[in-house]
Amino acid sequence: MDCFHLFVGPESAALVEEAVGGGGDAVELLLNYPAANDGYLRLLFNLSQMEFVEFYDFWNDFQELNSTYAMMFQDKNVNPNLIVVAFRGTEPFDADAWRTDVDLSWYEFPGVGKIHGGFMKALGLQKSTGWPKEIPPSPAGKSFAYYTIRERLKTLINENGDAKFIVTGHSLGGALAILFASVLTIHEEELLLQRLEGVYTFGQPRVGNEQFGEYMKGKMTSYDMKYFRFVYSNDVVPRLPYDDKTFMFKHFGACLYFNSCYRGQVLEEEPNKNYFSVLYVVPKILKRSL
């Protein structure tokens, strides 16, 4: 939960309001507890009081083992109004997660764009059939992240017509969070997209090429999807994989950027987007060591 500490305080509240044009459901969700100035602190408190639904350990069809992890919470035991899906990031000594991160192969959806192959495999890409809208029941111990979470959300929302959900994650988990929403749009999951309150990522790497980014911008507009991509000044992960002529990865959506003094602003792209210049790298290493 440490990543949520970034939210505390009125400046962060104003930053999110700016990112969504001064308002919107996602901001109301964060600020309705009930004073706007400490709305994020209240959200943190309420998340700590939410009911744990389930911890998931998902199968990766290409690594042939369980290597994707997620958790689900809800704000009430009966008729939940808010459901939170959180994907776990890369653990420092988790070799399987690192295999996912460095798998820079492309997976291409015709008419959508090219997407980071390692992340798609972690989310539930099928080795033999790709991304069908439905898959047959899996053997015991082989559940897939996208399909399992999608069906659980449908069940919870059908049980309570007022329920909405958010998706979040840090690092690798942030990539899986926005790609989960992306596959929902590709599969035209109208019910879930109408109930998706927002996607919140922290230190998220790039997930696709420019065509994919343009596709997602259009879908975010169509479904009024709020997307908050938080970046801390010294974090290298949001600068990877490179946005250049060789790798061709591109971020999309506004960057909620915090400098080393934790001052925030809304930017189109984080400064020093590829984190390669010595003039940037040396000061950042020194700051981290202090």
Image (tube, rainbow, N blue to C red):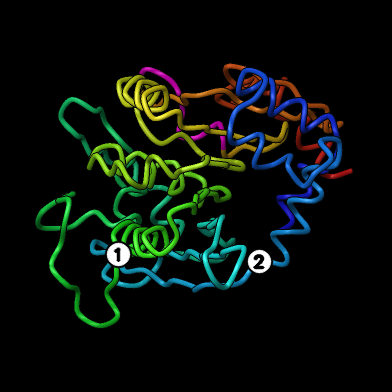
Q: Is residue 216 above or below residue 96?
A: above
Residue identifier under label 2: 50
Query: In which quadrant of the rendered image does the C terminus lie?
Result: top right
Predominant SS of the magenta segment? loop
Ranked by sequence position, the earlier of labels 1 and 2 is 2
Q: Quadrant of residue 7?
A: top right
**Over which residues does the magenta segment extend?**
238-245
Q: Is residue 203 magenta?
A: no
Residues at marks 1 and 2 touching, judged by CB atoms closer than 8 Å: no
Residue placed furthest toward the bottom: 140
Amino acid on which disc 1 is placed: Phe
Q: Residue at x 60, y 25 (%)?
A: 255
Residue 273 drawn at (x, y percent) = 57, 22
Q: Residue at x 32, y 65 (%)?
A: 148
Sort mark 2 into few (<14), some (14-19) or many (20+) by Cα contacts within 10 Å.
Answer: some
Amino acid on which disc 2 is placed: Met
Residue identifier under label 1: 144
| Residue 149 in the figure: left or right of residue 130 | right
Q: Secondary structure at mark 1?
A: loop
Q: Is residue 86 visible?
A: no
| Residue 214 in the figure: left or right of residue 84 | left
